[in-house]
Image (cartoon, rainbow, N blue to C red):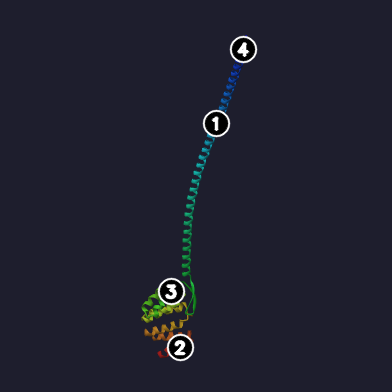
Amino acid sequence: MSTRRFRWHAAALAALALCGASAQAALFEDGEARKAILDLRQRVETIRTQAEANNQRLADENGQLRRSLVELQQQIDGLRGEIARQTGKNEELQRALAETQQRQADITTKLQENAPTQVNVDGREFTADPREKTEFEAALGVFRSGQFAQAQTAFAEFVKRYPSSGYSPSALFWLGNAQYATRNYTEAIANFRSMLSVAPSHAKAPEAVLSIANCQIELKDTRAARRTLEDLIKAYPQSEAAQAGRERLARLR
């Protein structure tokens, strides 16, 4: 083999070797690239899977939060409703309490208005209901106005309605006077005597005895009138009625 041919063969072998090395290098580089791509795909898939899991977890958490918020809102609404009901009940209780207090105040006022009070009539002090006082003073006002028939009715009703009243002796006295004014002498005598039987020491007792004598004089019963005047002078010698009785007795004789 000539030197020239040898050199050509050597060059060809070298070129072939170089091509083989380049091919092996290219094959190596392609494998690395594919591996890198596969690794990258794996990481992307892993990231995607994790992201989806995170998204699902967040969605679940958001759903739970929404349900919790709904439940909380329902509880708040329920509490508001309960507060409203309690407020309504409290308002009803307050109204009921106010009404009860008002009724109690009204009852107290009525009791105070109707409570017995101390009065003093014709020198006698006693306890009387406001109604007794009002009715007695009304009847006395009728008498003093000169309406003797109406006064007779008013005092007769008073004595019947309040037989145990402290006003009773005075009511009997004025009843007798009203009857005397209307010329009901017999009835007047009966009421004057009733007054004296229940209150012989009454301030108007001497006047009642003198009035009995006057009724007897009007009835033309002079003997009885004289006896009554003598009893008056004996029982109440220092009274003005006794002095008038002495004068009248002197005229009867």
**Camera-side residue of 248 and 58:** 58
Residue underneath mark 1: 44
Residue underneath mark 4: 4
Q: CA distance from mark 2 to mark 3?
A: 34 Å
Relative height, residue 14 to residue 138 (above, below):
above
Amino acid type at mark 2:
Gln
- Report the residue at 62% width, 12% height from top: 4
- Report the residue at 39% width, 75% height from top: 154
Amino acid type at mark 4:
Arg
Amino acid type at mark 1:
Val
Q: CA distance from mark 3 to mark 4?
A: 169 Å
Callout 3–callout 4 Cβ contact below 8 Å: no
Is 103 on the left-hand or right-hand side of 30?
left
Query: Quick one: which residue is furthest to the right in this view?
Result: 3
Q: CA distance from mark 2 to mark 1?
A: 143 Å
Is 107 on the left-hand or right-hand side of 219?
right
Quadrant of the image containing the C terminus? bottom left
- For the residue labelled by badge 1, is the local secondary structure a helix, a strand or a loop? helix
Residue underneath mark 3: 134
Name the N-terminal-most of marks 2 and 1: 1
Query: Quick one: which residue is furthest to the top in this view?
Result: 1
Q: CA distance from mark 3 to mark 1?
A: 110 Å
Q: Position of residue 120 (x, y in %)?
A: 48, 77
Callout 4 crowding tier (Cα within 10 Å): few <14, some 14–19, many ≥20: few
Callout 2–callout 3 Cβ contact below 8 Å: no
